[in-house]
Image: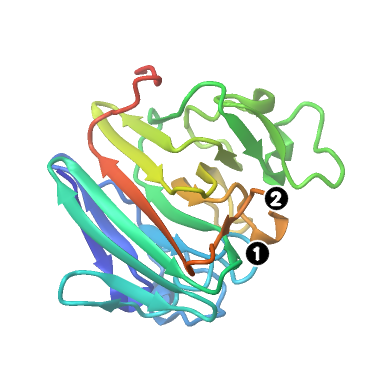
Amino acid sequence: MLTLTTDPAHGGRWTSLRSPTREWLWHRPAPARNTAAPGDAFVDAGGLEECVPTVRGLPDHGDVWARPWTRDDDGTEHVRAASFTLTRTARTDGDRLHVDYRLTAPAGFRFVWAAHALLDLSEQAAPRMPGGADTRLFPEAAPLLDGGWPSGAPWIAGPWPAPHGVPLDRLGPDDGTAVGAVVATDVCCVHDGADRLHFALEAEGQPVSIALWRNLKGFPGTGPYRSTGVEPMLGRVFDLADAGPGDAARVPASGEVRWRLTLTGACRCPDTPAP
């Protein structure tokens, strides 16, 4: 069973995701996180941040991570941003943790959402996703490519697990690189020794994906640190400004979008080989 702890007063951040054997969320000291206000540059304290309506771009990591959330008596948590309201409800069902989301906004509102989960993983850990899934690499991957980055391209695509020869299904030791990717799949299972953390995302009529942030002390430029993000997403780009047709979620005439994120400590990916 997974146990979730959140901090509504500080952006609704997930501060703990525990299984019987370990804590899954990574953290780093970041005192400025507790005083961050809407419009501030993102303060990376680890955990899981709700990033919406964008991840990169403006506002930096979205418009809710620095806003206080409200928790109702039934455990439902919600936040009102400039252009939308986001609500989530978490519940356990056996060994599964279901988190149900609802975003309300005017019809036609476009957004990207990511459960920006930074995980505490060993060098041997491996994210597993369906082989051959379309995978977008973004410009920070340029140093890892033999032929350089195509001029003006916001991303380049190839098949998981090694688009354009960049192996993303293993972490390994620090090498001074950082790369972000968005994989066209609704599932990911993280293997770390005997432990498993499985993500599954459901969102009828919306584009779903899993983003990977593999930072092996390549980011930031000053004081780089190691961090690994596995980020279920609505959308297929990090920056809403880069979204073409089908790359962002869109609010229908009903004025709301609903989706569910399910996490479990057991591997549920029949198409994903064990390491």
Tag on residue 57? 1
Question: Is residue 189 in sight in this rendering?
Answer: yes
On the image, numbered disc 2 is attached to which residue?
A: 245
Q: How many marks?
A: 2
Which is more foreground, mark 2 or mark 1? 2
Amino acid type shown at disc 2? Pro
**What residue is shown at x 47% (from left), y 27% (from top)?**
170
**What residue is shown at x 34% (from left), y 26% (from top)?**
269
| Label 2 crowd (10 A; few <14 / some 14-19 / many >=20) | few
Q: Quadrant of the N terminus?
A: top left
Q: Position of residue 260 (x, y in %)?
A: 35, 51
Task: Give the SS element for disc 1.
Answer: loop
Report the colour scheme: rainbow
Callout 2 touching callout 1 (CB < 8 Å) = no
Question: Is residue 28 in sight in this rendering?
Answer: no
| Viewer-proximal residue among 257 and 244 | 257
Does label 2 or label 1 sit earlier along the sequence?
A: 1
